[in-house]
Image: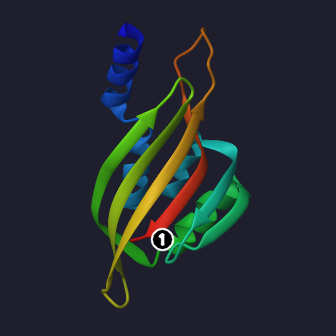
Amino acid sequence: MLRVLLLLLQVSQNYLVMQPLQEAIQEGRFAALAPICRPRVVLNLEEPLALRGAMSREQFINEFAARFAALSPEKIEWSSIQVEENTAVQSLNLILKRRFSGSRVFYKLILFMSSDISPDKEKEWKLYYLRGLKI
């Protein structure tokens, strides 16, 4: 029980990858995602981000940034988190606005992360799979 409480405290303090991801989306600086991604990231994103397959971290960041350039975030809301020993799933609801047409897109990003368990250092959560759904 104490172990679960400590894990929840750790999670609630920084919501895992909340800060770098939220800042990247708000400011359009996606290079900030590099430290939170595994060397290979698997993607399954629906329109308007439309990316599928396995990519290197750098390729993912470049492709994601290029697709996101046509959008601007109106609202970002962290909606759920589930954490196990060394795996976690977070979801993020977004209201995006298309820059040219002004139309809104309701989108959910689901982030699948893992951490290396090492007694020598603090857990670092890394993104290995990203699912995006237009809702």
Identify which residue is drawn at 40% across, 20% down.
Answer: 7
Quadrant of the drawing holding the C terminus? bottom left
Question: Where residue 50 sits: x, y (%)?
Answer: 58, 74
Label 1: which secondary element: helix
* Vertical placement of residue 59 versus 23, above or below: below
Colour theme:
rainbow
Question: Where residue 21 sits: x, y (%)?
Answer: 43, 49
Q: Is residue 16 left or right of residue 64?
A: left
Question: Where residue 1 sits: x, y (%)?
Answer: 37, 10
Identify which residue is drawn at 41% across, 62% down.
Answer: 108
Question: Where residue 117 sits: x, y (%)?
Answer: 61, 19
Q: Which residue, as the protein is rendered here, is positioned at the far front?
A: 1
Q: Is residue 90 left or right of residue 131?
A: left
- The quadrant in which residue 100 appears is bottom left
Callout 1 crowding tier (Cα within 10 Å): few <14, some 14–19, many ≥20: some
Nearer to me, 51 or 100: 51
Q: Is residue 64 left or right of residue 7?
A: right
Circle 1 residue: 68
- The quadrant in which residue 15 appears is top left
* Vertical placement of residue 108 versus 125, above or below: below
How many marks are shown on the rendered structure?
Answer: 1
Instruction: Give the amino acid type for the residue marked by disc 1 in the picture.
Output: Phe
